[in-house]
Image: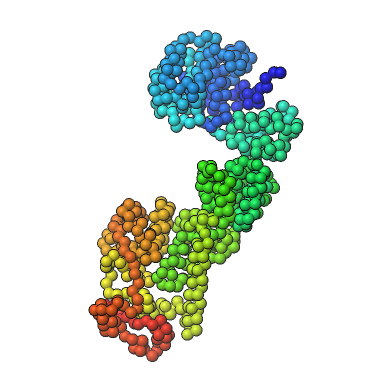
């Protein structure tokens, strides 16, 4: 029985023109040989199986070929045949991984000066040259810079960044690219035709996808499938041999995730486990499916580079319509992190199930800005503001200003995934309940305002009228003074400080910039409010509900970082200080001298509701209903 020659060796290119996908290298080498401008040292870098060592052998073959033609070896002379057989005495291949020490390089330096034994030149090919030690590289420098005229050095590596700069500067470098799917598919089909192997195009495509740009891997996988087939390579054979996951299974999982059906998603995982499939391959296929959905959603289903069949494209396009692009990007990042944890887990199945359940819970993600706004409304004013503070209730994929699944609409100025709390199931029922409570609070507030419009004007216009007259709402009165006393700051419904910072919209842009730089710092900063500017001092006030954020912002490192962002954004230097904001009840301070002074100031400076002119019935009714009073034109004294 003769030894079988595997396809990767049998179909190794014998000419430069047969090297697939590396024309930028082979054409340059052929022209350099024709013009007699070959360098004495070359460095070939690139991923595995892309033709580095093969090209080095072709270069050695054409240099010593007896009758080269058009920059190609003849492949018939004694020298070419010896190179093909690997027996040429003047083509020395060295494995850099096993000959990496200084002793081996010293031995090479001693032998490199000897004249060629069989041809006119000696060619040294050092594969995986990055494995050499620093001492070995240093010993090679002089020889590499000024080798004998009859010597050519060719280095090959998959990690050129590990090669010292002193070596790189002495070589001509060629970067080999990862082969495209179409290039791999064309070569495998040519091999199947020449070997008279019946095959399905989709089966060859699956092999090429698994090869990940490596021609050697693709030919080895084809060899394996041919051995396992019954004379024809079809999709079931490829899946069985390579342990690939059926695309319909992945599509079913994506469909279950899009419908937020955790039970169906876990049943699919159980089926994969029962079938004995590789769980990591399944996880990677799931991640690739999310990526395909994102590309389809962005490109509108016209992404030719996905290399999907028409049936797969139609199925995934239907599923992609249930997501927004932001949801898919969030899912991709979340599952990428889960895949890293999965690979380090002692119980892979449990982590896979948890990740899939988390992916199917994407509806429960809540935007931090909305959550903080609702908490702030509950803790300070006691009522939500419809519109800006209330999340939309859109349906998945409707594009009506909300994210899929009724999530809140993205806030301008920041990326969608940077404003979410939790991931999938990680944003638990408590987060959902908080959002629902906020919506209910905002709705009840809107109903109360609508009820007040029966007097002939809306609540908003009435509020504006009261504000212009200086009306004050109980629970939000402020005492005289504007500084931080004892580390606390009085809370104001509308801070005039924001006007000095360019308004609320400009402040939101600044917060978005901070979130882009450091997400957690931006989230903590969103819980505060600018309450005073005194020279270079910017005072941020935090409510009692935001004590954790307050503590984080008080950290000196975080303060310095905020000051840096402020200077970059506003063009002026600030010194950040913090204090706790408190709301003073309508009754003023507690019993004692402060209480008496407070009441005296109110009685002496603010007219009662009875003093409202008769021709302002709306204002009188509003003051009586809210229990407010009118401030004099000079404001609070």
Quarter of the C terminus within the rendering: bottom left
Placement of 141 over or under 446, stated as above or below? above
Rendered residue at 46%/12% (across/down):
111
Identify the residue at the far left of this view.
593
Name the foreground residue: 418 vs 533: 418
Q: Do we see residue 308 in this rendering? A: no
Quarter of the N terminus within the rendering: top right
Rendered residue at 48%/57% (across/down):
421
Q: Do we see residue 583 in this rendering? A: yes
Which of the 4 quarters of the picture holds residue 79?
top right
Rendered residue at 30%/67% (across/down):
488
Placement of 502 over or under 90, stated as above or below? below
Residue 249 position in % (x across, y down) = 66, 47
Name the foreground residue: 497 vs 255: 255
Identify the residue at the far bottom of this view.
614
Classify residue 314 as left or right of residue 620: right
Residue 374 position in % (x across, y down) = 45, 67
Rendered residue at 48%/78% (across/down):
449
Name the foreground residue: 321 vs 101: 101
Residue 538 position in % (x across, y down) = 30, 61
Q: How many marks?
A: 0
Placement of 589 over or under 321, stated as above or below? below
């Amino acid at each position: 029985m003769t030894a079988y020659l595997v396809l990767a060796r049998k179909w190794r290119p014998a000419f430069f023109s047969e090297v697939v996908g590396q024309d930028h290298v082979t054409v340059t080498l052929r022209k350099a040989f024709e013009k007699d401008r070959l360098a004495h040292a070359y460095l070939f870098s690139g991923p595995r199986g892309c033709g580095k060592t093969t090209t080095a052998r072709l270069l050695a073959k054409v240099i010593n070929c007896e009758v080269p033609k058009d920059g190609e070896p003849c492949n018939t002379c004694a020298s070419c045949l010896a190179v093909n057989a690997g027996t040429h005495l003047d083509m020395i291949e060295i494995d850099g991984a096993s000959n990496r020490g200084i002793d081996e390089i010293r031995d090479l330096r001693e032998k490199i000066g000897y004249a060629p034994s069989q041809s006119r030149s000696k060619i040294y090919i050092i594969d995986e040259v990055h494995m050499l030690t620093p001492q070995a590289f240093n010993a090679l420098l002089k020889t590499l810079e000024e080798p004998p005229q009859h010597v050519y050095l060719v280095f090959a590596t998959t990690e050129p960044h590990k090669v010292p700069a002193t070596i790189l500067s002495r070589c001509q470098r060629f970067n080999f690219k990862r082969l495209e799917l179409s290039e791999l598919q064309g070569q495998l089909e040519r091999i199947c035709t020449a070997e008279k192997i019946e095959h399905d195009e989709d089966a060859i495509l699956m092999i090429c996808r698994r090869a990940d740009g490596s021609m050697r891997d693709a030919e080895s996988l084809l060899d394996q499938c041919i051995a396992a087939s019954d004379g024809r390579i079809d999709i079931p054979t490829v899946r069985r041999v390579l342990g690939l996951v059926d695309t319909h299974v992945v599509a079913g999982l994506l469909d279950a995730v899009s419908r937020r059906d955790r039970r169906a998603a876990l049943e699919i995982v159980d089926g994969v486990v029962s079938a004995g499939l590789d769980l990591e391959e399944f996880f990677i296929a799931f991640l690739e499916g999310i990526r395909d959905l994102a590309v389809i959603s962005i490109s509108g289903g016209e992404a030719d580079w996905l290399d999907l069949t028409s049936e797969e494209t139609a199925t995934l396009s239907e599923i992609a319509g249930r997501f927004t692009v932001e949801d898919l990007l969030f899912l991709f990042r979340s599952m990428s992190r889960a895949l890293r944890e999965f690979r380090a887990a002692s119980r892979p199945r449990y982590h896979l199930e948890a990740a899939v359940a988390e992916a199917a819970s994407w509806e429960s993600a809540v935007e931090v800005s909305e959550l903080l706004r609702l908490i702030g409304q509950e803790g300070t004013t006691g009522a939500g503001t419809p519109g800006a503070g209330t999340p939309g209730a859109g349906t998945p994929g409707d594009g009506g200003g909300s994210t899929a699944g009724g999530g809140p609409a993205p806030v301008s100025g920041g990326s969608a995934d940077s404003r979410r709390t939790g991931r999938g199931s990680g944003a638990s029922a408590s987060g959902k309940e908080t959002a629902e409570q906020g919506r209910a609070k905002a709705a009840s507030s809107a109903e109360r305002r609508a009820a007040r419009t029966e007097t002939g004007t809306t609540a908003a216009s009435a509020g504006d009228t009261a504000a212009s007259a200086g009306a004050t709402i109980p629970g939000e009165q402020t005492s005289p003074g504007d500084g931080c006393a004892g580390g606390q700051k009085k809370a104001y419904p509308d801070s005039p400080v924001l006007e000095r910072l360019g308004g609320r919209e400009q402040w939101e842009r600044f917060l978005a910039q901070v979130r882009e730089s450091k997400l957690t710092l931006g989230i903590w900063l969103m819980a505060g409010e600018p309450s005073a500017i005194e020279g270079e001092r910017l005072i941020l006030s935090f409510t009692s509900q935001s004590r954790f954020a307050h503590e984080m912002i008080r950290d000196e490192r975080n303060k310095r970082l905020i000051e840096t962002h402020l200077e970059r954004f506003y063009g002026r230097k600030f010194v950040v200080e913090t204090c706790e904001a408190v709301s003073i009840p309508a009754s003023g301070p507690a019993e004692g001298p402060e209480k008496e002074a407070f009441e005296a100031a109110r009685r002496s400076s603010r007219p009662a509701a009875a003093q409202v002119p008769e021709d302002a019935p709306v204002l009188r009714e509003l003051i009586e209903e809210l229990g407010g009073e009118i401030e004099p034109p000079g404001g609070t004294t």
